[in-house]
Image (tube, helix red, strand yellow):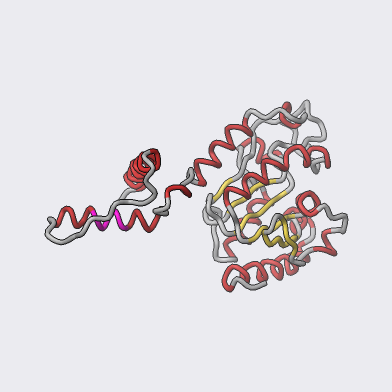
Amino acid sequence: MKQSEYLKILKLVRTSLEEYNNWGENEVYKASSVGISSESRKSNVLKKNIQKTFSTNFTKYSTSSKEELDNLREKVNSCKKCPLGKSRLNVVFGIGSPNASLVFVGEGPGYDEDHKGEPFVGRAGQLLTKIIEAMDQTRETVYIANIVKCHPMIDPSNPEKRTNDRPPTPNEVEICKNYLDRQLEIIKPKIIVTLGTSSTKGLLNNEEPISKIRGIVKEYKTINLVPTYHPAALLRNPSLKKFVWEDMKKVMHFLNTGKI
């Protein structure tokens, strides 16, 4: 079945579920298959598959994670709560699976990300992609975001200038972090990997240098969190790669076994 056809079915199912709920029903009516046609049996099989995909308890039915993220993206696109929103070219919201078990969190978009509107697409992003693939994952199966959604610039008046990136300030992080928190609430990952000092400090409120805290399992809002070096640091100092890989092996072990 094509993805477009599947999405149409899901849309029809969602409408039906909402209608059931509006009428006070909390489960799908399940008729006996005795004496019914083969077409009806096929229909029942489809219904059972749908029931496996969606909870039959409609009081718990909610909008899909993708739709919730899309709605949040629209809100972020219009955000001007801090000066970063006035100088950016594009909001860099996030990319990947809305149901990812693993979320990577960087500090903020750079020049390339600001121009494309997608996180980690420059040299550091290419290295992150290699790390993800070495973990037997893809950019489509994980979720990648930043702790701030707009490009922090040394010279905000010149977004076309390269070497114009800077870390976000604590105030910028504080203002923007609510959006990341909402992303995490929607996605419900099993584990977070913070990349570098800004995202680690922003989520953990920890002043320790990344060299001291990396690889140590922490917790953020009941979600396991592993800090590690930012890929840009690996480009500057390739000897750090072995430490990042140690950290990623710990993450892979958790995803495979559920144990830290």
Give the camera-side residue of 229 and 164: 229
Q: Quadrant of residue 128?
A: bottom right
Give the camera-side residue of 80 and 239: 80
Magenta stretch holds residue 47: yes
Which residue is at a point 65% across and 51% down the rendered structure image? Answer: 125
Residue 24 horizontal side relative to residue 80, left or right: left
Q: Quadrant of residue 24?
A: top left
Against 4, residue 88 (above or below) is above
Residue 204 horizontal side relative to residue 245, left or right: right
Which residue is at a point 71% across and 50% down the rendered structure image? Answer: 106
Where's residue 197, x and y in %? 80, 53
Quarter occupied by the C terminus: bottom right
Stretch of the chain drawn in magenta: 44-48
Q: Is residue 219 visible?
A: yes
Q: Quadrant of residue 179?
A: top right
Residue 180 horizontal side relative to residue 33, left or right: right
Against 89, residue 4 (above or below) is below
Q: Is residue 4 visible?
A: no
Magenta stretch holds residue 6: no
Where's residue 160, x and y in %? 71, 31
Where's residue 232, x and y in %? 74, 53
Give the camera-side residue of 79 and 145: 79
Where's residue 65, x and y in %? 52, 46
Which residue is at a point 73% across and 26% down the rendered structure image? Answer: 86
How many discs mark residues in the rendered view? 0
Query: Dominant secondary structure of the magenta stretch?
Result: helix
